[in-house]
Image (cartoon, rainbow, N blue to C red):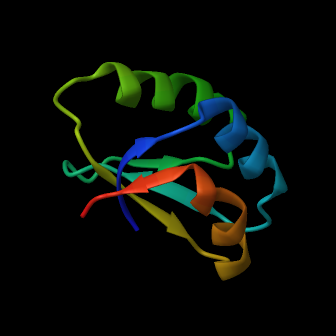
């Protein structure tokens, strides 16, 4: 899903803890962040959110059930 923002970052982190499969954030530059890694969450997402040049990105869930956990926190690109 193409996303422009995460509404509730704390809630998003908690939802990621429930995920069973791999969840990735992919930038337009094709940087891939494994969001099931706690280290990547803290370092990678901080970098993504603080960079004004990154206005949208893609979230990919490799287990379709995981999307149910995180979808309420995502603001899709229209």
Q: Is residue 46 above or below residue 56?
A: above
- Residue toward you, 52 or 39: 52
Q: Residue at coordinates 77% horizontally, 60% vertically from top-left? A: 19
Determine whether, in the image, residue 21 is placed left or right of residue 73.
right
Q: Residue at x 49, y 66 (%)?
A: 60
Foreground: 23 or 1? 1
- Quadrant of the rendering where the N terminus is positioned: bottom left
Q: Residue sitting at 60 percent across and 33 percent down?
A: 9
Q: Residue 20 location in percent, x, y?
A: 80, 66
Q: Residue furthest bottom?
A: 64
Relative to residue 68, is residue 1 drawn left or right?
left
Q: Quadrant of the C terminus?
A: bottom left
Q: How many marks?
A: 0
Q: Position of residue 56 (x, y in %)?
A: 27, 47
On screen, residue 10 above or below 77: above
Q: Residue at x 78, y 41 (%)?
A: 14
Q: Position of residue 31 (x, y in %)?
A: 32, 47
Q: Is residue 69 left or right of residue 45?
A: right
Examine the rendered structure and indicate whether residue 47 appears above or below residue 36.
above
Name the spot of residue 16 as percent of width and height, x first: 72, 50
């Amino acid at each position: 899903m193409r996303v422009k923002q995460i509404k509730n970052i704390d809630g998003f982190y908690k939802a990621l803890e429930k995920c069973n499969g791999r969840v990735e954030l992919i930038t337009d530059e094709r940087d891939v962040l494994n969001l099931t890694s706690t280290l990547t969450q803290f370092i990678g997402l901080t970098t993504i959110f603080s960079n004004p040049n990154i206005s949208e990105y893609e979230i990919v869930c490799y287990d379709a059930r995981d999307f149910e956990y995180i979808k309420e926190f995502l603001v899709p690109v229209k």
